[in-house]
Amino acid sequence: MDQKRTMTSVDIRALATELRDYEGAKLDKAYLYDDDLVRLKLRDFDRGRVELLIETGDPKRAHVADPDHVPDAPGRPPDFAMMLRNRLSGADLVDVRQHEFDRILVFEFEREDADTLLIAELFGDGNLVVANRDREVIDCLDTVRLKSRTVAPGSVYGFPASRFDPLSCSREAFDAKMRESDSDIVRTLATQHNLGGLWAEELCSRAGVEKTRDIADATDDEYDALFDTLERLREDICDGNSDPRLYWETENEDDHERTRPVDATPMPLAEYEGVDCDAYDRFTGALDDYFYELDREEPEPGSTRPDFESEVAKYERIIDQQEGAIEGFEQEAEEYREMAESLYGNYDLVDEILGTVREARANDFSWGDVEARFEEAADAGNERASHVIGVKPESGEVTVDIDGNRIDLVPEEGVEKNADRLYQEAKRVEEKKEGALAAIEDTREDLADVKRRREEWEAEDTEPEPDEQDEDGETDWLATQNIPVRYDEQWYERFRWFHTSDGFLVIGGRNADQNEEIVKKYMEKGDLFFHAQAHGGPVTVLKATGPSEPSKDVDIPEQSRAEAARFAVPHSSVWKDGKFEGDVYEVTPDQVSKTPESGEYLEKGGFTIRGDRTYYENATVGCAVGVQCEPETRVLGGPEQAIAEQVETYVTLEPGQYAQNDIAKLIYRELKSRFADESFLRKVASPDLIQEFCPPGGSRLVE
């Protein structure tokens, strides 16, 4: 028997019914593992700790898990997990429902400041979408841009097209679907009635109907038996009258030695009669044990070849879809530009139509009257009036036909503003196209990675190549394959940070809260305080000692001080303003105070500086981002002079036209291309992580 790797629609309906028992539970924390497994840790008044797992990759599942089955918390949480925590911490789970009869679970959370929908798509490539109550997407695990629907931050989430729901259909609808089919009974139930193969066969078995009978030969009595069985089945499922089972494959019939789990179902199945099974009180418990055992299975070395072909086919299919979306965006943008140019090419005609509408509306003509007058004029042979197709009272627009283009115009805006609006729409669509181009590059990288892993698997009798070394005996990491990953997260990584050429730690705040925290908690006697002589600069502290070491006076070299000053400049408004240098001052900790001068007020994150200051005038704003390979593998960023000796390779930035997220993607691709180990950078970095080392505002790569 094949093992189940994704939940059926029937499973999800039964699970949703059970999960409503957890309504009122509060969310404590969210975790993300391997880009497709989300763990929600909740507190329930009656049950205590509740661990909810949602996996959208392979396998696809959702269930409450035993705490012993929950993976250890990962290291540094990625951006998606942090977004979930910020959005959902303290929120109440108020509803769990299946969308229609699709493999989609919707979790609804409420908090005083915001309501949130967590939409788990457990079909196709899988996805997890976070949206507000109006279904506007806040974030998602995977961006989807298809002609039929778009799932991306800022878009309005649209469910897939509705499918037939056998658990709510009437007898008439059931019979109609049967009559429309030209196949046999079981295939009709599986496809036309959306039951899937297993439950279609189960329905036939319970009803005593021959599943392979041609639909044209089916009798009314068989229709009656099937629908009656379906009604009893859906009553049990929807009312929560479950009797769950976990089914096992056994080695032989004599000793019943179990080899592996094969399915978990909300009730016993006639199709599995004779198969070894365990009974459960709750379906979510059966699912938990099933997927836990599935995860624990490890094939003997060399016994099972990963299904690379399925992965390759999946990514190739995604690329085809993305290419179709890009082509659609290009066509849509071109159509908007053509409409705008048509307005200018027929300026007098359009201006007269808009003027006529404005005058009629000013004289209290209703929209219906306006439309009727244009129709009368067109019938009378007025060529200009014939270009008016109709009006839209709800939006205050008039629809015209210009050069074969149907264009909706706002009369009050005139020709120029209407044309400009169309150009802006074309620009907006072009931006969507740029996002799709970035997404397709990521998918192509995933495809290349699968093909590389396939080649490695298929390579026989090959010894690992020794690390290439340069003339000094040092490892050439750029040319090395299979670079070992070594990383230990440090306390200061949530701040802006770097180590100077002399090894001193420099930290800076990312916001007002961190500015306050650094000064109050981490700045000690012997440290040095730096700040750009510009608005919006972060607190920057050069640490003389570590947080667990006693403070002491240390002779900090001038080079480290200058590097700390250069670090303070790019993260201030100097960079945002496109300037290439700025002034920075240095003071000691005892000169920094939260007590304002008389009559003054200090905002959060602001401080009063008293006494003399040491200035670094015209400090340059250069910033470098690179990859360290030893003693640890990680991304580093900071002044070029300090970073150059600590990394294997790096790029330098200066103020420019690319936003933080865009420049981070460019840096990622550039650094990735420099390593022979194509998968290395994906293991130690991501555009999100690289972005943390980029200054706020626009940037560009220095050639």
Image: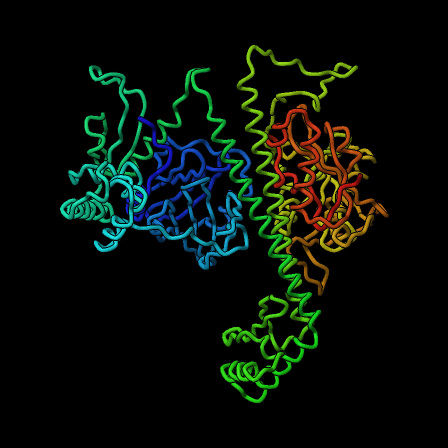
Nearer to me, 599 or 17: 17
Say which quadrant the C terminus sits in. top right
Q: Residue furthest right?
A: 617
* Residue 246: % across, % down: 27, 31
Say which quadrant the N terminus sits in. top left
From what the image shows, is residue 520 above or below residue 270? Answer: below
Residue at horizontal 34 percent and vertical 32 percent from the top: 4
Nearer to me, 42 or 680: 680
* Residue 485: % across, % down: 60, 25
Determine whether, in the image, residue 414 is placed left or right of residue 559: left
From what the image shows, is residue 603 above or below residue 489? Answer: below
Determine whether, in the image, residue 56 is placed left or right of residue 588: left
* Residue 130: % across, % down: 47, 50
Q: Residue 459's quadrant in the figure? A: top right
Residue at horizontal 68 percent and vertical 62 percent from the top: 601
Q: Is residue 662 visible?
A: yes
Q: Is residue 97 visible?
A: no
Nearer to me, 337 or 448: 337
From what the image shows, is residue 270 above or below residue 662? Answer: above
Determine whether, in the image, residue 198 is placed left or right of residue 454: left
Q: Residue furthest left?
A: 221
Q: Residue 679's quadrant in the figure? A: top right
Residue at horizontal 47 percent and vertical 34 percent from the top: 73
